[in-house]
Image (cartoon, rainbow, N blue to C red):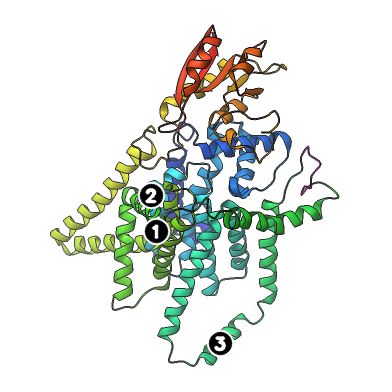
Amino acid sequence: MIPSRLRRRVGRTELAVGAMVVLALVVRLVALGSRPLHWDEARVGYWSLRYLETGHFSYRPVAGGPLVYLLARASMALFGATDFALRLPFALLGAALPGIALLFRSRLRDDEIIALAAVLALNPLLVYYGRFARGDVLAAGFALLVLGFAVRLLDGGGRKNAYGLAAAAALAIASSGFGIVALACLGVAGLLVFDHAALVTSSRPAATRLGEFVARTRGSATPAARALLVFVGIYVFTFAPRAGETDGAGLYTPGTILTAFDAAIFNSVRRFVGVRVVHRYPEYTHEYLPYLGDLLGTLAIAAVPVTALALGAFLVDRYGTSGPRALVSAGAYWAGAALVFVPMLTEVSAPWLGVHVVVPLAIPAAVALAALIRWGRSALDAGDVPRVAATVLIVGALLVQTGGVAASEVYAPSARDTDLAHYAQPPSEFDSFRDNVSEWVGPTDDADVDVLYYGSSMYVAETADDYPPVPDSWGERLPLAWYIAREDADTRSVATEAELRQLSDVPPVVVVPATERGTVAPLLDGYVAHEYDTALWGRRVVVFVKN
């Protein structure tokens, strides 16, 4: 039985949001490990597994945010090296997104809070990439958490909200480089909202407004300093290197802790700026409009209801008689800034970029959805059949579109015509390799080589893949490298036919680019060939297995 005191604290809105969190968890955990790993996921899995085995970890901007690897390592340590375990922490954090809606209780009505939780729980794009080992949903979610704590602070909330804001900001940055972009876009939105508020109150002298601000913030230096310590502490913990079995600096290695702090606070920034800014031009630049078009295309497929509702809410709120609501404007401005800057700053055009637009759009979309349902309920109470029918048709269409996208994109097998899947997603036929590689490799507790990679495109010198950075040819092995590594298989590579002929004992599994099949097949008598696509198109490999 629920205690009466707790029953009073937990109202219907909180229970409804809790139900949305549970629903979000269910839709993210269903068949979580069924889809083969995308190359990015396989990279995360491989290096997280190496981190688990060796204890060595170092932040590298090209590989994504460090929080991704810390979460993946912890999950695999608990549940084993499986696709499900790798994705589990991302699914759990993605499922927690609806709970953030409760932070906006001072600015949203109860039905708007529930609608926001529903959008965050069920949007197909957030569900698809909430089941994906990347940091985009985490970065956008933590940025939304920053907004929630900021709103509570502005509305007179306790100092703990400042600490929550600082922690969320640090975690957003640690999740992905796009965490910085999300926070910057949120900052742009805040400036625009503040500017509008200043225009509305422009009749009051600037000195008066400044004096009021100083009065409100008097005595906040100590909480601000504590919040800064929270930010720095989480930032250092996530970005600091771990030495493991190496002789380098590590957060847990006596005598090198100060060096690890320096690496976390300063070297991480230097690395990020070097990789993402200084050395990006001109090789990794791109035309803007095609990337913007791809992002708009993703929203047109996976976020039509959210986008339409959000646009309607923004226009009505902005130009209606009651005047704009700051939170609705902030969500719209944040989404607009993301729509401009995300395709500009990304290096790869991919569907997951839409996450950074959908999350802020969820706020105005929720306001519109709640208003639509209220309109329908008032019509029902008044016996207005046409308005009731219109409400049912509109809400039904939104649900059908969302459910259709979820059925055809989120849970359907990956194929070339799957819109939410990125090029580097192996098709469902790759399941055969994943399911059989353990049997093909056999026992791995001896000193023999278990898997051989053939060809210059896959050649990696011995020990060159122990720690990053690795040569580009290592990327040609993805996602096979993850599935082979989790079997604890010993690998070797040869670049030429002559090297292959010189081997006295060929391993039981040989991986070859499909273009080299004709060269290698005559040399592998007694082997059975299995051919796979490791991407949605144009990247085939042949796996020769000893019969």
Check disc 3: other Cα within 10 Å, few if <14, some if 14-19, many if 20+: few
Which numbered disc, 2 or 1, marks the residue that appears first in the sequence? 2
Q: Which residue is mark 1?
A: 362
Q: Which residue is mark 3?
A: 210
Which numbered disc, 3 or 2, marks the residue that appears first in the sequence? 2
Between the C-alphas of marks 3 and 2, the distance is: 42 Å
Check disc 2: other Cα within 10 Å, few if <14, some if 14-19, many if 20+: many
Between the C-alphas of marks 2 and 1, the distance is: 9 Å
- Say whether marks 2 and 1 touch (CB < 8 Å): yes
Where is the C terminus found, in terms of image quarters? top right
433 w.r.t. 370: above or below: above
Measured as percent of width and height from the top left, residue 254 is found at 85, 48
For label 1, the SS is helix
Left or right, 238 with respect to 322, comes to right
Identity, as a three-letter code, of the amino acid under mark 2: Asn
Measured as percent of width and height from the top left, residue 344 is found at 46, 58
Which numbered disc, 3 or 1, marks the residue that appears first in the sequence? 3
Q: Which residue is mark 2?
A: 123
User: Is residue 251 covered in magenta?
Assistant: yes
Left or right, 355 with respect to 167, comes to left
User: Is residue 338 covered in magenta?
Assistant: no
Q: Residue at x 50, y 55 (%)?
A: 141
Identity, as a three-letter code, of the amino acid under mark 1: Ala
Main secondary structure along the magenta-highlighted residues: loop
Where residue 507 sits, quadrant-wise, is top right
